[in-house]
Image: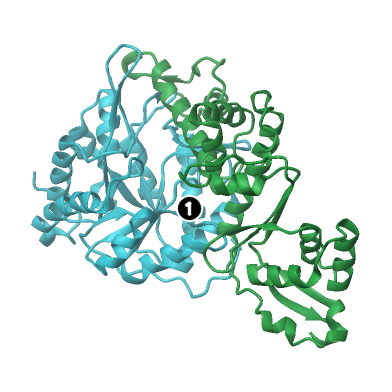
Chain colours: A green, B cyan
Amino acid sequence: MRPEASLSFADSFAPALLDPARSTPEVVTGPNGKAAGRRYDVYRNNVTVSLIDALAAVYPAVQRITGAEFFRAMARFHVRSNPPTSPLLFQYGREFPAFIEAYEHAQDMPWLADVARIERAWLDAYHAGDAAPLLPTRLSAIAPGRLADAVFIPHPAMRIVRSPFAAVTIFAANRDDAPVDRIDASRPEDALITRPEFDVAVRHLPAGGAVFAACLASGQPLGEAAATALDASPEFDIAANIAGLIEAGAFTSLACGDAS
Amino acid sequence: MSTVIQPTRPAATPLRFATPIGGVAGTSFKPEHLPDIREAGPRRGFFEVHAENYMGDGGPPHRALEAIRRDHPLSLHGVCMSIGGPRPLDKAHLARFRGLVARYQPALVSEHLAWSTHETSFFNDLLPLPYTETTLACVCDHIDQVQEAIRRPLLLENPSTYVAFRESSMRETEFIRAIAQRTGCGLLLDINNVFVSATNHGFSALDYLADFPLSHVREIHLAGHAEQTDDEGDLLLIDSHDGPVADAVWKLYEIVIRRRGAVPTLIEWDSKIPDWPVLQAEAAAAQAILDRHQSAATGGERHAA
């Protein structure tokens, strides 16, 4: 009976939850002096398994590619070293792609981390704020001489993921249960992720498209963004790219100098 | 208590108390059931959601919840506020919770007597606390803050536990009664939790219920549990929410409803989720018991044995 007892119970209870090397906290007990080992292990198991499940929910294609056993072993390491810091589990796992990149048993799948980055961006797009996408007619209403000054406001769901591997094709082939054909993983692919209404869409951007979209999303005027994209990829096609981005729902509005 | 909570977005409408929903049975809302629910149209009952699943900015989760809320009363059940923890409440999380209450005007709003965050880590489990004067004061302070933020009473849920703390100096029922008296909060009585904890700690579920402040109960939870064993090889029940309500829990439920009168009752089923008709059948079983006791719904605790 120590009614003046401090609030330190959590300091004693918490550290062993994700550390199997630690023994059962002294502060807990079973009834009538019974042991608390297996009882405390229920909490350890709940915490570890539910956080691994949370990563599996964010990264279903990665799990399909590696198989559940490989995935859960890899996720267990990550959960123990990087537990979530937010109670919103759909935010969890931002460091997981980098973890995969460094994971010794995943070195023969160098594209796996980029597939994970697309999945993380997919879920961010899914939960992003609602906004009506820019109508294509807004662009055609601008006088040709003013087009270079047009500045685009990105849609809250818009994301870009660049990869030196065929990450978009591998992602798309593994988000459902359909059989997967052989994929040449060595072809570089950049992904555009959008959610114009309620369905998240992942597109493969053409050459120069990722640089162009990133410049526009950062607030560069159209002319400047196109020049940067052309520097990056001589085959960059401005008309096809701007039409494609607008059709995908990448923007919500545009402004054109004093005409805005 | 003068804490000022800034919502993440301004409340669209002033907060108000939602109409009481009476003695109806509800179910956990699972998005995979949405097509079946919409096809069936408005029905008697309510839906309960875990608040944290709807704390994103937009997208399909809010569309689904709006569709549900249009036709049915809603119960907003927080899982991660860490009310039972020693650390100050997460102000950003409290603001998100308040925002959901303002936006969806739920009929019921509840949280747990448990904690899940410590230092910077979120453990995603409902962890236990010792029952002492010190923890009581801390829990009451946290509930004051939540009620201040949402401007309505919170319903606090009794936990299921697997261990006890050596330093505990109060019974759980005594602790919960003191919280209800000091903060004015209502209670969410989870009868499966009572059954699980009674088995795990070797006390009588009937004694617990006899000592529980039933007049403060505004909602009941029923759920399934799983079986394991403890270090001594004795039965240890796990609050798994992955199956039908056990017969013994139904019996306790009927005893509680006979004493308390009909109160909103939720069938909680959160993993190995069944098809919609299976979940609906569990709710219908609870509704049948409620309907037998509807006349007693408003009287509070009855003292006849």
The quarter of the displayed image where residue A82 is located: top right
x, y percent for residue A151: 80, 74
* Secondary element type, mark 1: helix
Q: Nearer the viewer, residue B162 or A98?
A: A98
Q: Residue at x 11, y 58 (%)?
A: B291
Q: Give neighbour class at mark 1: few <14, some 14-19, many 20+ (Cα, 10 Å).
A: some
Q: Nearer the viewer, residue B52 or A197?
A: A197
- Screen quadrant of the N terminus of chain A: top left
Residue B184 appears left or right of A139: left
x, y percent for residue A141: 74, 87
Residue B44 appears left or right of A237: left
Q: Which residue is mark 1?
A: B53
Q: Residue at x 35, y 55 (%)?
A: B48
Depicted A219 relative to depicted A255: above or below: above
Amino acid at pointer 1: Asn
The quarter of the displayed image where residue A247 is located: bottom right
Q: Nearer the viewer, residue A94 or A42?
A: A94
Q: Residue at x 12, y 49 (%)?
A: B258
Q: Nearer the viewer, residue B190 or B89?
A: B190
x, y percent for residue B173: 31, 37
**Chain of the residue displaying label 1:** B
Q: Is residue B166 visible?
A: no
Q: Residue at x 26, y 29 (%)?
A: B198
